[in-house]
Amino acid sequence: MPPKYLALLVDDSKELLKMATQHLEEKGIASISAESGRKALSLFKEQKPNIIITDLKMKDGNGLWLLREIRGEDITIPVIFLSAFVTEIRDSLFEQGATAVFSKPQEYVKMIDFVFQNSCIVQNTKIEYSCPAGISTMVSFKATSIA
C-alpha cells in the first residue's frame, strides 16, 4: 500500500537529500529522492507524490525546467523551491507556478515545517502545531494545493 503522503526531494547534494529524508521521516512523511531534474520527472510520473521540493540549480539542469514540466502535467501539486539562489528570482518562480520558495540553508527548518503542515491538511489530520513566526509573510501557496 502506498504511503498516505509522499514527498519528492530533488537536489544534486546527496547530503541534503539524506538530511531532508531523515527530517521528513521524523514527521511521518515518506519521501523519494532524485539528484537530477530528469530523474525527478520520471519519479513524479511513476510514483505520483503529493509534494515536490526542489533545488533551483543542479548539474543537469534546473528546477525551473522541472517546474514547467510538472505544471504541464499537474497544475495542483505543490512545488516548493529550497535553494541558495532564489532571492533574485523569487517573484518569477511564483509567476511560473511555484507554491512556496525558501532560501537554503537559512529557511530549511521552515520548509520542513511547511511540508509537515501541508501533509496534515491533505490527510485531514488534526495539527497540534503552529506555523513558525514570520512564515506567513515569507511563503505563498495555492488554496487548491491544500484543499
Image: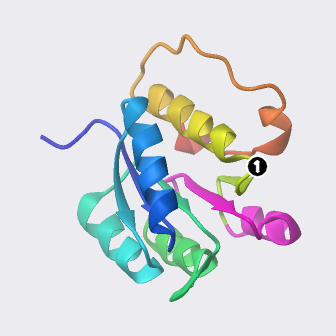
Q: Is residue 65 visible?
A: yes
Based on the picture, tell me whether residue 88 belongs to the magenta stretch.
yes
Magenta residues span 76-96
Q: Observer-nearest residue: 95 or 136?
A: 136
Residue 5 image-quadrant placement:
top left
- Residue drawn at x 43%, y 29% as measured from the top left: 27
Task: Kindly identify which residue carries mark 1.
Answer: 106
Name the amino acid, label 1: Gln
Q: Can residue 142 be seen in this view?
A: no
Measured as percent of width and height from the top left, residue 7 is found at: 41, 49
Left or right for 75, reference 49: right
The extreme bottom residue here reads 60
Residue 98 image-quadrant placement:
bottom right
The extreme left residue here reads 1
Measured as percent of width and height from the top left, residue 20 is found at: 48, 49
Question: How many numbered discs sit on the rendered protein?
Answer: 1
Mark 1 closeness class: few <14, some 14–19, many ≥20 residues within 10 Å: few
Based on the picture, tell me whether residue 35 belongs to the magenta stretch.
no
- Residue drawn at x 40%, y 82% as measured from the top left: 38
